Image: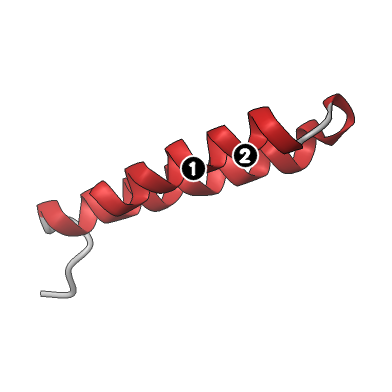
Amino acid sequence: VLLFSGFILYDTSNILRYYGTDEYVSATLALYLDVLNLFIALLSILGIMSDE
């Protein structure tokens, strides 16, 4: 979970520095995937996505 939270901070920093105003779709997609990965990691920690 901490790793994916770090990815969110890193990608947010990159978006503010390097992405232009016309690249909003790729910036949004990067943040969306980070949040999705964080959500999946939380679900796996809570045991909701376990196979058993």
Q: Which residue is mark 2?
A: 14
Q: SS at mark 2? A: helix
Viewer-proximal residue among 16 and 29: 16
Instruction: Name which quarter of the figure residue 16 lies in.
Output: top right
Residue at the limit of the structure toward the right, as seen here: 22
Name the residue rendered at 55%, 33% in the picture.
Answer: 12
Which residue type carries mark 2? Asn
Q: Quadrant of the C terminus?
A: bottom left
Tell me if residue 36 can be seen.
yes
- Does 2 sit left or right of 25 as displayed? left
Q: Is residue 14 above or below residue 50?
A: above
Residue at the limit of the structure toward the bottom, as seen here: 52
Crowd tier of the residue under label 2, counting other residues whose Cα lies within 10 Å: few below 14, some 14–19, many 20 or above: few
Q: Which residue is mark 1?
A: 10
- Whether residues under marks 1 and 2 lie with C-beta atoms below 8 angstroms apart, the answer is yes
Which residue type carries mark 1? Tyr
Tell me if residue 1 can be seen.
no
Name the residue rendered at 56%, 34% in the picture.
Answer: 13
Q: Is residue 40 above or below residue 21?
A: below
Q: How far apart, in angstroms, are the residues tagged by discs 1 and 2?
A: 6 Å
- How far from the left and from the top, in percent, is residue 42? 23, 48
